[in-house]
Image (cartoon, rainbow, N blue to C red):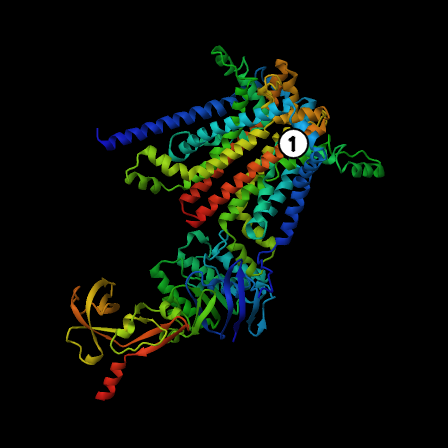
Amino acid sequence: MKKNTKTTRVIPGFHLTLGITIAMLSLIVLIPLASVMVKSLQLSPAEFWRLITKKNVLYAFGTSIVCSFIAAVINLVFGLILAWTLVRYDFKGKRILDGFIELPFALPTAVAGITLSKLYSETGWFGKPLAALGIKVAYTHLGLIIALVFVGIPFVVRAVQPVLEKLDGQYEEAAYILGATPAQTFFKVILPELRPALLTGFGLAFARGIGEYGSVIYISGNSAKEHTQVISYVIMQKLNYIDYASATAIAFVMLVISFVILFLINIVQMRQSRRTNML
Amino acid sequence: MYVEMKNIYKQYGNFTASNNVSFGIEQGKLAALLGPSGSGKTTLLRMIAGLETPNSGDIYIDGQRVNDIPAAKRGIGFVFQSYALFRYMTVYDNVAFGLELQKMPKDQIRTRVMELLEITGLSGMEKRYPNQLSGGQRQRVAFARALAPRPHVLLLDEPFAAIDAKVRTELRLWLREVVTKLGITCIFVTHDQDEAVEVADQIIVTNHGEIEQVGTPFEIYKSPDTPFVAQFIGKPSVVEGYDALNGFDAIEGAKRAIIRPEFVKISRLGKLERFMSAAEEGIVEDVVFRGNHLDVTINIKGISVIGEWSLEKDTLEIGEKVNVLIYRLYIIDEQQNRTYLCENKEMQEEDIFYI
Amino acid sequence: MTEQEKLERQSKRTRMILIAVSVLFIFLMLVVPLAAIVVNSLKEGFGFYIQAITTEYVRNALKVTLIATIIAVVVNTFFGICAAWLLTKFSFKGKQVLATLIDIPFSISPVIVGLAFLMTFGRLGWTYPAIRAINQWLGTNFRIAFAIPGVVIATIFVTFPYVSREIIPVLNAQGKDEEEAAALMGAKGLKIFFKITFPQIKWALIYGIILCTSRALGEFGAVNALSKTRGETFTLPLEIDALYMSGTDVSITSAFAVSSILVIIAIIIMVVRNILEHRSNKKMEKGEA
């Protein structure tokens, strides 16, 4: 029966924009990334394994992943609180507060990095009182986590805000009339609705954290002994030593991690849109 | 036939939107594609417009096969369900858009736009933006915009769906008047049978991607071809075991029948003047106020039948016994996909006997 | 106290706590750092500040930064519009995959971006023989890695999805009926775009361009891997890095002074976003589509 499977596109420009999009995407993004992949796959498996299981590399992976995860969890909690406050409550200065959320997106990472490093150093505004309490922040994992919280917070807030805005107040009222306490309403009714957005925000903050460079290298101290080197720093170090084999091998693993996270976020978002479409 | 679809077949993935559809519309006629949502009526309209391409089959406009002619060159005007007014253009610019594309001189555009705004009753609104208009006004701008380049065929997708009930009735009559006056061939999609019956010269009933029946509103109403049409048009009550009713015999293979309220005459017990032998005795089960009449559900030998009762008469009480005369019913044969109109046999016999 | 009153008091208390936590968080995590930049940059006085941001190195870095930013913004605006048109006006197989691929630069470490271009255009890259052959033939010494073209292309990469990501949701929300209606009347692509689509996406496009600009101005990791010559191929962030890493109090103050240029741009972005957000909220309240 099927003779003519050609579809009509009344709006012009399909082939043109398809061509331009794919050409530019390939040229600028896909081919360079493929180059890294191919280069790293030219290593023998044993060599590849040896390079990525060097002690300092493994520590750096551990540091990046663990610190990013902790920072993403902190961002999840505070991101939810911030989004809730900014959407649900009206108070003076709310709009300015809302504007500040954008700061980590707008501020160059290197600027953020030197600023945080300065603030938390032993002579800095925060570093001094904290040092008096015996807490050392700069050049420790704690400093690293703070920097990652800084760069990651807008991801969670901006993912949750629109969903919370759309969440109908009647929803909560319905739960309230049925006799739910505010806590029950929040955990049983609202939180499940926000879960996809929270997961997306968490994933984005986590992914960004693992690859973060500019904002963390100043505050982390980059000490191999203290395990405060992040994985991006190690790649940069290898590049400076012209050790391209190690750099590409590490980059390969990072790319795989990035793609997995991106893929998971996509699944979450697709599920969400499918569910809302059914409503 | 001015617009003609021949053996149209259209599939989206596993979903068959049009299955071997053929129909035609004469020049100057107002046709309605009527069917429930998901029956493929909008797809048909979009294929005529050139917004979709059939997988197979031919589309003709004015004797010319238009399958390979782009939408813009088919000489059609299209009114979208959402109107698709250009929200960043004024009413004037919206209506003038198609004319500017035809490179019409400015002063002629002005005359034509003003003329259309006059016809659509929108004079004085030309400087407004779509979001400053009411639903009915937007609909008329969309209509004026579609008509401006003098199309030969006007296509409307659910033109009244987004308008509130009262304005809708006015717009229906207005549309019919304008289209008839202009003599343009017009096809519109609707799921509302009242709308189709009131506006169209010809109704094409669609269901599951197939055409159930094509005919004038009267034909569709009076002699539904298929069980689907019989159940879709009017206010049908479906009854099983209809042969238990006085005056009707069973047709083999057909288990169910359809009775419309207008086929039923309800009288107070013993007040029926004629055809006593053709009538039934029933008990009032339910009475529902419908604004200008009452809908009365009557149980006859376990079969529920709905009839109307005038507000002028004393109200019937639930549980009251009444006489019911059923003039006719449609017996539907789902296996054969046919319907049979059956008149009350007893009434005919009585006629013969007395006259 | 009735149960109703109890509940109301509870919810008021929750409200107070949450607002306090939010204000405190934003103040400590975001406001103070911003203030710290300003304070640190003016530590040695205003005269020093002016001097610090007008050195030869800074002027050159500003030039390189602006070149890279302008090219990246132009390229990505063009790409963003094409990609958004493709992804919102048509349905085709692999659309979801394409959309995901476009977003890749968001989730990739900038250092890997730098590495990727080194592996493509550097001495070990697979295009290097071709570049060398062309240079020999033309008698030039054109380079991509460790030169301005490399900085430019890395900047394009990291800002690649910014414009498209801002306009795609707007176009999706507006649907494609209007474009279809115009096409039905015989309008051509450019006419449809400029008359019908462009007014709808104007603000989103401006915001996307601003975001793209900010990210381009501030890119550090990718450029760091591809640019090694201070005073020639250094961008502002690299210059800031160099000043900060010198480690003297004076050079650190200079680093903050140079940073303040970029901070001004960051503040503009925050304000514009706020205004746009407010606009769209007001529109929604008025019930406009």
Q: Position of residue C177 (x, y in %)?
A: 51, 55
Find the residue positioned furthest to the top. A132
**Local crowd size for mark 1, using a 10 Å CA cut-off: few (<14), some (14–19), many (≥20):** many
* Res. C128 image quadrant: top right
Q: Quadrant of the C terminus of chain B?
A: bottom left
Is residue A164 visible in the rendered image? The answer is no
Provide the residue designation for mark 1: A251
- Compared to residue A271, the image places residue B258 above or below, namely below
Expressed as whole percent of the image width and height from the top left, the position of residue A79 reads 45, 31
Name the residue type under label 1: Ala
Looking at the picture, tell me which residue is in the foreground, C31 or A33: A33
- Residue sitting nearer the eye, C5 or C115: C115
Residue ID at (41%, 47%): C287
Q: Secondary structure at mark 1?
A: helix
Residue B296, position in %: x, y?
A: 23, 66
Q: Is residue C208 visible?
A: yes
Provide the chain ID for the residue under circle 1: A
The number of callouts visible is 1
Which of the 4 quarters of the picture holds residue C65? top right
B64 displayed left or right of B241: right
Closest to the observer, A54 or A66: A54
Q: Quadrant of residue A54?
A: top right
Give percent across and percent down for residue C96: 56, 47
Instruction: Specify whether B94 is left or right of B239.
Output: right
Q: Is residue B191 left or right of residue B283?
A: right
